[in-house]
Image: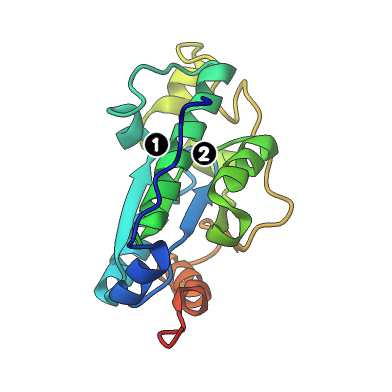
Amino acid sequence: MNNIIPHTFHVTREDRNKLKGHASFVVWFTGLSGSGKSTLANMVEKRLFEKGVHTFSLDGDNVRGGLNKNLGFSREDREENLRRIAEVAKLIVDSGSLVIASFISPLASDRAFVKDIIGVQDFVEVFVNTPLEICEQRDVKGLYKKARAGEIKNFTGIDAPYEAPRFSDIEVKTDLEDLELSVERIVNYLNTKLEINRNE
């Protein structure tokens, strides 16, 4: 590590933000499997893209199919999964794009760890607060059924804990609120953060 010297580039993140016309940061969706994280994240990205915002999505299953396909679901592997995701997200933020990240990230320590890597000022937490019973009723991937049958071990919400955020930037309850309304609330929150001073 002593021989690693970070390179200083002529084009900065601020330059890229000005070129693209908006700030860059991470919008991190957390919640149980089946809570609606990926659906909401996809809808938010589409809305922002239509407004001319440069975006990139990172989603649990997609990342595990490539970058993190060598990782399992032990506590250590889950931590490494999130560490890699956070580092990738940070690089994309530096490129001037807004990152839409959708990951269960079940423990408060997980999310604090991710926030520390990305930077507090570049991290917006969206808590998709959907009760376990609703998520289990939906069971869109059939994972809860397998977990209840003992076919999947350490499944969040069944035999592994999910620690709900005590303080999130945005909280969405998909069992009580229309998805379009939720998307509108999230986008409205992000609009101010996306603004940059073009005269700097």
Asked if residue 152 shows in the view, the reply is yes
- Picture quarter containing residue 158? top right
Label 2, on which residue?
A: 104
Q: Earlier in the sequence, mark 2 or mark 1?
A: 1
- Picture quarter containing residue 71? top left
Vertical placement of residue 47 versus 174, above or below: below
Nearer to us in this view, 181 or 106:
106
Residue at image coords 31%, 54%: 56
Asked if residue 99 shows in the view, the reply is no
Q: Residues within 10 Å of mark 1 (few under 14, many from 20)?
A: some
How many callouts does the rendering have? 2
Q: Are marks 2 and 1 in contact (CB under 8 Å)?
A: yes
Relative side of 113 to 153, left or right = right
State the image coordinates of residue 87 (x, y, percent, origin top left).
Answer: 46, 40
What residue type is disc 1 on? Gly
Label 2, label 1: how far apart the Cα atoms are: 8 Å
What residue type is disc 2 on? Ile
State the image coordinates of residue 143 (x, y, percent, origin top left).
Answer: 42, 26
Nearer to us in this view, 168 or 130:
168
Q: Residues within 10 Å of mark 2 (few under 14, many from 20)?
A: many
Residue projecting furthest to the right: 166
Vertical placement of residue 154 versus 62, above or below: above
Q: Which mark is residue 88?
A: none
Q: Which mark is residue 60?
A: 1
Residue projecting furthest to the top: 150
State the image coordinates of residue 112 (x, y, percent, origin top left).
Answer: 66, 43
